[in-house]
Image (cartoon, rainbow, N blue to C red):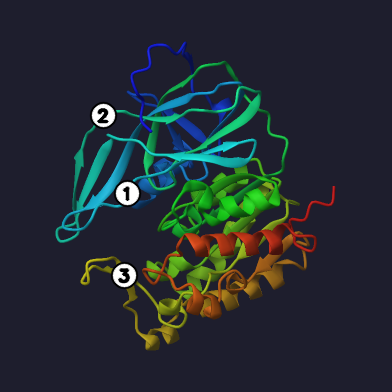
């Protein structure tokens, strides 16, 4: 669905500005256009980590939103995708088109930059490529709200937006849900950007999603807490745990005060906002076995395995069961003075029984069907009539 030679169309080119974008906290001007970021520059400067830099600039939950009569929409982008030496290419990123909130098309693009990673040496080679075009045609000739959801797993520079009719920004009228989590929240292994579980839950809950799910980087970083503190939100959720185990970043002694500090910082900016702490979903390799977890490519596909020792729990190493127990205790302690704080056990979203039916393909990340199940359950448990995010207004 790339741009054909169509000289008969009277194109209108609209500058891509913040009022047309949702889910991004900042736009960086680049040589080619604009790059959406999900962390502000000050936070990025304090988190000088390559994994985080890649994750936050992959636009999970970021979408162009505009009102138009256009029947054809073209979006020029410059993507950066990843590949591993000696392994099959990863699937191309997908752009989802929503018309009046309904999925109405999907497309991909060509060209772009390639980051080629050699797992044997740890080196990475950047191979530059050309700008590509995403095209959606055959739209109805009526006024409609159009959303283009950007790939959740490819860095995407936005170069140009062309339509055959004028476009207008659409004001936000729904509540804003601000969510933070790991690669599972970013959408790892989901097939398209509206198929990641936070997008599924946001659609069912009727809210505007700001997704601060960062692959490998939900690590209780203070700059992330400050970002949550300073970002507009009507409801907030923080999903804590899996990255702390699979990076083996801290021990129990550091974990408990770090959680308190993270929540304290969020409360500085949102003292009365409903705040939901979500513990990890079921993940057999780390239920009782500490990290770190490492990728295993021995069978030609990526599989993760836990490399910690069960005996190390006595020294304070974290496991998912330990984290769930501590998060539940911390929330109980804090709700004495914070009635708007809530806890959700992640196993209510995906349990051991779910694992039997829908196993994690790489032992760590859910597939598309599992993302949908998690999103549907979160919508019911958080946004449903008896949930902490229920809209009683």
Q: Which residue is the site of mark 2?
A: 130
Residue 317, can we see it?
no
Distance (Cα) linking label 1 and label 3: 22 Å
Q: In which quarter of the image is residue 343?
A: bottom right
- Count residues near mark 3 (Cα–Cα under 10 Å), then give few for <14, some for 14-19, many for 20+: some
Q: Is residue 133 above or below residue 85?
A: above
Q: Residues within 10 Å of mark 1 (few under 14, many from 20)?
A: few
Q: Which of marks 2 and 1 is nearer the N terminus?
A: 1
The residue at which mark 3 appears reads as 303
Q: How far apart are marks 2 and 1 (CA)?
A: 23 Å
Gap in Å between the C-alphas at discs 3 and 2? Answer: 32 Å
Viewed as shown, does residue 134 lie left or right of 83?
right
User: Where residue 161 appears, x then y in whole percent?
Assistant: 46, 22
Residue 249 at what x, y percent from top left?
40, 67
Label 2 crowd bin: few (<14), some (14–19), many (20+), radius 10 Å: few
From the top left corner, tell me how far across and down residue 196 is, in percent.
51, 54
Name which quarter of the figure residue 56 lies in: top left
Lateral position of residue 26 relative to residue 266, left or right: left
Q: Mark 1 points at which residue?
A: 50
Q: Between tags 2 and 1, which lies in front? A: 2
Helix, strand or loop for disc 2: loop
- Sooner in the amino-acid sequence: mark 3 or mark 2: 2
Q: Is mark 3 on a helix, strand or loop?
A: strand
Q: Where is residue 251 in the image (x, y as percent from the top left)?
A: 44, 73
Q: In this view, does 352 lie above or below 10?
A: below
| Res. 185 mark | none
């Amino acid at each position: 669905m790339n741009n054909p030679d169509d000289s008969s169309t009277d194109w209108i080119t609209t500058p891509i500005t913040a009022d047309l974008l949702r889910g991004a906290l900042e736009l960086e001007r680049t040589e080619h256009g604009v790059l959406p970021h999900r962390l502000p520059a000050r936070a990025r400067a304090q988190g000088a980590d390559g994994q985080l830099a890649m994750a936050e600039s992959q636009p999970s939950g970021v979408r162009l939103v505009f009102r138009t009569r256009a029947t054809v929409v073209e979006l020029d982008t410059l993507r950066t995708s990843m590949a591993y030496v000696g392994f099959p290419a990863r699937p191309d990123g997908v752009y989802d088109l929503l018309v009046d909130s309904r999925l109405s098309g999907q497309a991909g693009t060509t060209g772009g930059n390639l980051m080629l990673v050699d797992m044997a040496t740890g080196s990475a080679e950047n191979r530059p490529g050309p700008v590509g075009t995403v095209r959606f045609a055959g739209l109805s000739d009526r006024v409609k709200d159009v959303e283009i959801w950007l790939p959740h797993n490819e860095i995407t520079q936005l170069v140009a937006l062309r339509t055959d009719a004028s476009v207008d920004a659409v004001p936000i009228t729904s509540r804003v849900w601000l969510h933070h989590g790991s690669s599972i929240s970013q959408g790892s292994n989901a097939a398209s950007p509206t198929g990641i579980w936070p997008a599924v839950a946001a659609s069912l809950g009727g809210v505007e999603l700001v997704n601060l799910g960062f692959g490998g980087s939900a690590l209780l970083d203070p700059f992330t807490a400050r970002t949550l503190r300073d970002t507009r939100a009507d409801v907030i959720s923080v999903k804590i745990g899996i990255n702390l185990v699979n990076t083996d970043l801290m021990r129990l002694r550091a974990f408990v005060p770090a959680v308190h500090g993270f929540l304290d910082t969020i409360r500085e900016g949102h003292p009365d906002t409903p705040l939901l702490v979500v513990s990890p979903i079921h993940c057999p390799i780390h239920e009782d076995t500490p990290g770190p977890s490492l990728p295993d490519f021995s069978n030609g596909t990526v599989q993760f395995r836990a490399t910690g020792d069960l005996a190390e729990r006595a020294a304070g190493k974290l496991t998912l069961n330990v984290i769930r127990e501590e998060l539940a205790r911390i929330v109980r302690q804090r709700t004495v003075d914070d009635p708007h704080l809530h806890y959700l056990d992640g196993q209510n979203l995906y349990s051991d029984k779910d694992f039997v039916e829908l196993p994690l393909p790489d032992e760590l990340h859910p597939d598309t069907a599992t993302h949908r199940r998690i999103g549907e359950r979160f919508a019911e448990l958080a946004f449903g009539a008896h949930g902490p995010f229920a809209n009683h207004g």
